[in-house]
Image (spheres, coloured by chain):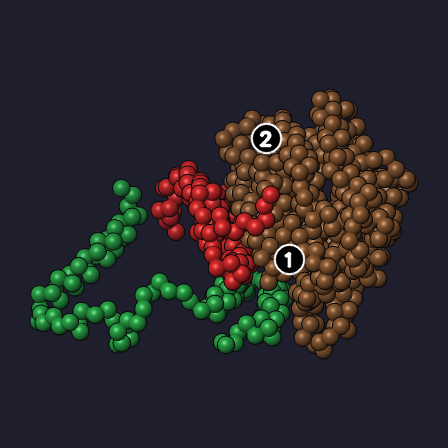
Chain colours: A brown, B red, C green
């Protein structure tokens, strides 16, 4: 009982603490500022300041952990900072920063520019930090809930919009259902090990050896809960509705950051406490991954709404990511890390172009595929950026997307899952069809000329995402080294 | 202090009760059509989790499980607040709380 | 039967017998004079205006939501209160931080006008 809050604890917690501090302060800051356009700019600035201070704290952790394999264990072993958590934390911060940049104009158009939005973005981000750093069931559960609760509100943020409400209620009901499943599984894990620490649970399961009723039930409920969170096949039905109904900026945040955080949870659990049971869960996850690929890709083929199409394509990307876990070797885990980062920039990019072409006056409320018609002639730069993002999502060589798929396929071949690799490669061909539908609309169809809702923040965000997507494909070396360090555990 | 009489009820009974409550919650979540009822089923599931944590914590003679159940309670309350707020906005915009009627996002 | 349950069963028997006895004794000794007014449902002395199944004003839900949030904070104050001597000033500081976060929420709700009855 000595040393309740040591300096090591403080050092480990600081990035998340910064986000919570700024996230709470921004709620009160709103009352101190006079109303008007100056206030909204202040809110964006303050949010970026919060993210920057978290980034500085994170950078200091990064420097402290320069030796490979080193880690900081804080709060009596319930919170770890290692290269894994650092890698994911950087992803979350980047996603939050880009989403903040693209939200300004979007919220102006929707007429819902309020401080709570930015507060919730920061709080959700701190929840993700806890997920990535969690070494204890309690920490992980709380991180997950902090993230999920923020997202429930964000998805329903346009409270006068029926579609946003509906997305929020569906996401809320299915999200809290899956959290309950996870919590039940956690209680069984605690029951069979007598500890909430992930490492001790792993040891307890390892000593138990065989799969008995309680272990099987714990594994099944946790697997179901996590698969819900990553929107994998039998449990994916919330994703299209939540993605399509949510404010587009929130869709962007949800589809990349929440997805990455859920994969951090998945990797922490299945490479940690549940790793002794890998003979049991590996075939299950393989089956789920293939089902996810099939459903995601085929459902995306027939979508007329761009956001729903992107939602189903996200589901199919979850399938590829799960295949990395099936392989489970170093290449596979590195593949997941690389894939998540590349997918993040590309998916954010696609959604921000959607935001840019959407204006209240042009009446584009449904985000139909036809809204993109003629974009190539109207706004060549945005169309070119969109093309890069779509190529990356499809995994075409000059862009980063190829790299992520390459590592996943390579890991599958290395571990003797050639059949899975072939199936996955076949579905790349299917996905080309629906990504190409968007490209054809942009370049080969005449469209109504419409104004572009661009802003400085939006242009910066599109530029960052586009350059990142291209650079990751052309000069992947420094990034690969960073990602490789991330997952050697 | 004499041993508490509770210890004479085997742990399994608590776990069976907890699993039963949890399954009732799952069944209700799947079969009920009113949002408030579905939400109550989720709360029932969380309470089953609490029961299981407290029983197991007693078995292990630790407080970790109690602490977890505290956090589950708080999470349940936070979910209730957020959930009720979302339900209110849905009701305001649609005048219904039947999930089958809330289906404009579909194709 | 385990001996530890004896007080419980005694209490159970007592809890059943007492209201029964009260009802029976009251029935025996009171005069019986049923009037129509007496048979009405009692609702603050005035006749019931509508059924109790109607809709509530939305304000009640908002108050209920706020109540749920601030009610559960005591879950964390109780363990501290039980153990506060051992935790010392650190515990006080910890609880102060915890309450400060809640105060941010409270101030926000207050400024948003969620506590006013319009």
For residue A387, which quarter of the picture?
top right
Quarter of image, res A276: top right
Q: Quadrant of the N terminus of chain A?
A: bottom right
Q: Given the current orientation, which residue lies at the most extreme right position?
A: A475
Which residue bears the numbered disc 1?
A154
Compared across the picture, whether C15 is left or right of A298 comes to left
Question: Dots 2 and 1: beta carbons under 8 Å?
Answer: no
Q: Nearer the viewer, residue C110 or B6?
A: C110
- Name the residue rendered at 35%, 62% in the picture: C53
Residue of label 2: A207
Q: Earlier in the sequence, mark 2 or mark 1?
A: 1
Image location (x, y in percent) of residue A248: 70, 54
A24 left or right of A409? left
On the question of residue A82 being in view, the answer is no
Residue drawn at the location 63% of the way across and 61% of the way down: A158
Tell me the element at label 2.
Answer: helix
Where residue A360 sits in the image (x, y, percent)? 71, 61
Q: Position of residue A487 (x, y in %)?
A: 77, 39
Image quarter for residue A123?
A: bottom right
Q: For mark 2, name the chain.
A: A
- What residue lies at 72% left-to-right and 78% top-to-bottom? A34
In this rendering, would A413 be left or right of C25? right
Q: Chain of mark 1?
A: A
Vertical comparison of C67 with A178: above or below: below
Work out whether residue A234 can be spotted. Answer: yes
Q: Which quadrant is the C terminus of chain A positioned in?
A: top right
Residue at the image point whose x is 32% and y is 68% from the top: C50
| Towards the viewer: A226 or C16 | A226
Q: Nearer the viewer, residue A58 or A29?
A: A29
Mark 2 vs mark 1, foreground winner is 1
Q: CA distance from mark 2 to mark 1?
A: 43 Å
């Amino acid at each position: 009982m000595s040393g309740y809050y040591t300096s090591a604890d403080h050092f480990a917690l600081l990035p998340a603490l910064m986000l919570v501090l700024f996230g709470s302060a921004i709620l009160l800051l709103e009352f101190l500022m006079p109303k008007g356009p100056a206030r909204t700019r202040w809110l964006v600035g303050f949010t970026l300041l919060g993210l920057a201070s978290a980034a500085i704290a994170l950078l200091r952790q990064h420097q402290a952990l320069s030796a490979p394999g080193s880690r900081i264990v804080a709060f009596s072993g319930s919170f770890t900072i290692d290269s894994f958590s650092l890698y994911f934390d950087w992803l979350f911060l980047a996603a939050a920063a880009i989403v903040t940049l693209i939200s300004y104009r979007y919220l102006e158009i929707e007429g819902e520019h309020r401080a709570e939005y930015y507060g919730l973005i920061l709080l959700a981000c701190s929840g993700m930090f806890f997920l990535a750093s969690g070494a204890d069931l309690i920490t992980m559960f709380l991180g997950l809930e902090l993230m999920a609760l923020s997202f429930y509100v964000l998805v329903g943020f346009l409270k006068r919009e029926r579609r946003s409400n509906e997305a929020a209620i569906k996401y809320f009901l299915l999200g809290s259902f899956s959290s309950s499943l996870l919590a039940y599984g956690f209680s069984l894990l605690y029951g069979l090990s007598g500890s909430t620490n992930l490492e001790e649970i792993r040891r307890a399961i390892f000593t138990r050896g065989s799969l008995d009723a309680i272990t099987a039930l714990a594994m099944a409920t946790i697997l179901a809960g996590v698969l819900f969170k990553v929107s994998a096949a039998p449990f994916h039905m919330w994703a299209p509705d939540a993605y399509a109904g949510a404010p587009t900026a929130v869709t962007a945040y949800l589809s990349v950051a929440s997805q990455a955080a859920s994969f951090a949870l998945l990797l922490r659990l299945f490479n940690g406490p549940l790793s002794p049971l890998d003979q049991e869960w590996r075939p299950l996850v393989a089956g789920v991954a293939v089902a996810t690929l099939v459903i995601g890709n085929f459902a995306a083929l027939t979508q007329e709404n761009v956001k729903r199409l992107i939602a189903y394509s996200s589901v199919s990307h979850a399938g590829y990511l799960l295949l990395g876990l099936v392989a489970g070797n170093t290449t596979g885990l590195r593949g997941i890390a690389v894939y998540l980062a590349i997918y993040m920039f590309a998916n954010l990019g696609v959604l921000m172009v959607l935001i840019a072409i959407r204006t209240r006056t042009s009446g584009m409320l449904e985000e139909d595929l036809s809204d993109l018609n003629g974009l190539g002639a109207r706004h060549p730069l945005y169309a070119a950026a969109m093309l890069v993002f779509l190529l990356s999502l499809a995994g075409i060589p000059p862009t980063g997307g190829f790299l992520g798929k390459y590592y996943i396929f390579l890991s599958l071949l290395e571990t003797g899952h050639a059949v899975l690799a072939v199936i996955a490669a076949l579905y790349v061909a299917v996905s080309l069809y629906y990504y190409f539908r968007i490209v054809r609309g942009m370049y080969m169809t005449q469209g109504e000329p419409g104004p572009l809702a661009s802003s400085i923040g939006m242009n910066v965000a599109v530029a960052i995402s586009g350059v990142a997507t291209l650079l990751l494909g052309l000069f992947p070396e420094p990034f690969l080294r960073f990602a490789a360090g991330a997952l050697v555990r | 202090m004499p041993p508490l009489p509770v210890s004479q009820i085997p742990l399994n009974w608590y776990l069976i009760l907890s699993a039963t409550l949890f399954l009732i919650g799952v069944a209700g979540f799947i079969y009920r059509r009113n949002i408030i009822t579905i939400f109550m089923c989720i709360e029932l599931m969380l309470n089953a989790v609490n029961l299981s944590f407290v029983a197991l914590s007693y078995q292990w003679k630790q407080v970790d499980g109690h602490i977890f159940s505290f956090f589950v309670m708080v999470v349940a309350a936070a979910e209730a607040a957020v959930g009720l707020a979302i339900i209110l906005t849905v009701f305001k915009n649609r005048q219904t709380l039947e999930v089958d009627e809330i289906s404009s996002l579909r194709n | 039967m385990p001996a530890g349950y004896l007080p419980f069963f005694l209490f159970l028997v007592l809890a059943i017998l007492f209201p029964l006895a009260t009802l029976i004794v009251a029935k025996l000794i009171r005069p019986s004079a049923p009037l129509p007014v007496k048979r009405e449902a009692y609702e603050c002395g005035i006749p019931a205006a509508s059924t109790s199944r109607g809709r509530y004003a939305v304000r009640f839900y908002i108050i209920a939501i706020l109540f749920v949030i601030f009610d559960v904070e005591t879950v964390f104050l109780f363990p501290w209160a039980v153990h506060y001597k051992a935790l010392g000033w650190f515990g006080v500081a910890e609880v102060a931080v915890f309450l400060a976060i809640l105060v941010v929420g409270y101030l926000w709700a207050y400024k948003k006008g969620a506590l006013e009855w319009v």
